Image (spheres, helix red, strand yellow):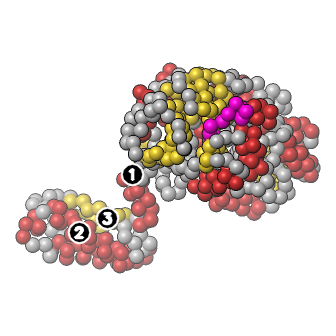
Amino acid sequence: MKKDFTPEDELLFLALGGSGEIGMNLNLYGCRGKWLMVDLGMSFGAAEYPGTELMFPDPDFIEDRLDDLIGIVLTHAHEDHIGAIPYFAADFGVPLYATPFTADLILRKLEEAGLVDAVELNVIPDDHGSITLDPFTITYIPLAHSIAEGNALLIETPFGHVFHTGDWKLDDEPQIGTPATEDELTEIGNEGVLALVCDSTNVFNEATSGSEGEVYRGLLEEVSLHRGKRVLVTTFASNVARLQTLGAIAEQTGRRLCVAGRSLDRIIEVAQDNGYLEDLPELVDFDTAMGLPRGEVLILATGGQGEPRAALARIAEDNHPLQLVSGDVVLFSSRQIPGNELAIGRVQNMLAERGIKMVTDRQSEIHVSGHPGRPDLKALYGWLRPEILVPVHGEIRHMQEQARFGERCGIEHNVFQKNGDIVRLAPGAPGKVGEIHTGRLVLDGDILVPADGDAVTMRRRLARDGILIVVLGDGDGVRVEGIGLPLDEDYPAFVTEARTDVLAAIGKLRGSERKSEEAISEAARLAARRCAQRWSGKKPQTRVILAKSAEA
C-alpha cells in the first residue's frame, strides 16, 4: 500500500468526517496530484467530552498537503456541512464555493469571526452553476432537502463522473426551490456516472421521506383544530420551506405570526435577502402577540431539540415574554435527533406539567425528513445507474445497510468505507487502497484540542471520580481536600484518616527517599488515594503539593 497518498493518475475518495457518524462532514477527492474538498462541517458537543460545545473532524491529513488543495465546495448551509469554516478556512488558504443562500450564511459567519478579508468566498448560481478546478469540473445539481438550496455535485474527472448527493430527498411538492427532475437526473445517468457518493441517513426507512406539501396540509389541519388556543410550532430554523408553510398557515387560519429565536431571525433575514419568503406575513413582536386574543397568534420558536437556552425551553419554564397556559398547544414540527431524547423529554415534561398539549410527528403529519428513504434511494439508483456506490453521511450501520441495498438494486460495485479509508474509484476495480489516522477536535473554551487529548480525558475522569488534593508542609503539616467524593457526613472522619495514612506512608521511607520530593509525593499520593477508595469506592485523581521542599 502507498504511504504518501499523493493522488497519481487515478481518482481517490477520502472522508475525514461524516462516514461513521452523522455530522462533521468533510470529504476529499484526489486526482493527478490535487485534492478537492467537499463540505467542512461540525457537530455539537457530546456528553463524553465534558466542557466542550463543538466537535470537528481533524483535518491533519489535508493540512499536511495544503499546497495540493485547490478549493472547498459546499453543498448546502446546514451546520454539519459548513459549521467548521470559521475555524479552518483561513488557515487552509483556498477559495470557497457556494450558492447564494449558503454563501450568505457563510459570509455572516466569517464576519462574526473577523475573517472576511482572510477567506475568498465565491458565489455560484443555484441553477446548475458550474466551476472548473483542474482536474475537476463541478456542477451544482439542485435537490430537495430541509433547507434552501440543497445541492448535489456532479464532479467531472478524467476518469468519469461522480455524483455526490450531499443531503437530499425526493419531493413532489417542494415549497422552496425547484429540484432537478427525473428526466434531468436520467439524462445525467445517460451520460454515465462512475460513482454515486450517497447520503445514508434514512436507509432503514421503508417508506419515502414524504413531501413538504404533505406537511403543509398536516400543519394546516392541526392548527385549525385548536381554535381559541395559542399555538406554538417549533421546527429547525434552517427549514425555509417550513417557515414558508407556517406563514401561509398563519394567514389562512386568521392568526398573526410571531417568531422567537435568534437563529430564526437570522435565517428569515438571509432567506429574504436571497429571494425567499417574500410573501411571509408581517411579523408581530412579543408584546403585540401577548395582547392578541389567544386564537389569533401563531408562535414560531426555536428549541425543538430541548436546547436549554432556546425559546421553547424558556417558555416551558415560564421565563420568557411569550407565555403559554393550560390548554395551549405546542406542535413539534421536527424530528428527534438521536442523543437529544433526555433534553427534549425535560422540556416536554415541563409543558405537560402545566397542562399544555403537545403534538409530534408520531401523532400527526406535521414533519417529514430531509433525507431519502429506501424508495427514494432506489429511484435515484435507477435514474443515475452508477457503476459504483459509496455510502456516506451515516453511522457504520447506515452505510453498511446502504451498500447491501445498493447491491440488491443491481449496482455492481458497492464500496463500504469509513473515516480515514482511502478508496480508489478508478482506474481498475474500486476499493480501499490505504488508511490514515483520523480523529476529532473539540472547541474547549477558545482552543481547539484533540477530543482524546489530556485535557478532555482528565475532565472526564474528574467528572467520574472527583479529585483529591494533598498539601504537605513541614513536619506533620498535612492537609487533605476532597472534591466530588460521595462522603457527606463521613467527610471529616475520612480527612482525619487520610492525613494519618499519608504521614505513615512518608514515615516508612528510608535512605535517599526521605529527601526525594518525587518519592515523598508518590507515597503521599498513593496513601491518600487508597484511603479515598476504601471510604468511597472511588479512585479520585490525586495531586500532591509540596508547600516546602523536602530538604527544608
Q: Which amino acid, by three-letter code, is at mark 2?
A: Ala
Q: Where is residue 27 in the image (x, y as percent from the top left)?
A: 54, 39
Pick the quarter of the image with the C terminus.
bottom left
Pick whichever of labels 2 and 3 is earlier in the sequence: 2
Q: Is residue 413 visible?
A: yes
Pick whichever of labels 3 and 1 is earlier in the sequence: 1
Label 1 secondary element? loop
Q: Which residue: 74% across, 48% down?
A: 378
Q: What stretch is highlighted in magenta?
A: 188-197
Q: Residues within 10 Å of mark 2 (few under 14, many from 20)?
A: many
Q: Is residue 223 visible?
A: no
Q: Which of 388 and 348 is in front in this view?
A: 388
**From the viewer's perspective, is residue 278 above or below residue 193?**
above
Residue 358 in magenta?
no
Q: Which residue: 84% across, 52% down?
A: 365
User: Mark 2 touching mark 1, by CB under 8 A?
Assistant: no
Q: Which residue: 24% across, 76% down?
A: 500
Q: In which quarter of the image is residue 244?
A: top right
Using residue 202 as the reference point, say whether residue 520 is left or right of it. left
Pick whichever of labels 2 and 1 is earlier in the sequence: 1
Pick the quarter of the image with the N terminus.
top left
Residue receiving disc 2? 524
Using residue 276 as the reference point, say whether residue 35 is left or right of it. left
**From the viewer's perspective, is residue 121 above or below residue 423?**
above
Q: Mark number for residue 275?
A: none
Residue receiving disc 1? 453
Residue receiving disc 3? 542
Q: Which amino acid, by three-letter code, is at mark 3?
A: Thr
Q: Which amino acid, by three-letter code, is at mark 1?
A: Gly
Q: How crowded is mark 1: few (under 14 residues within 10 Å), some or many (20 or more)?
A: few
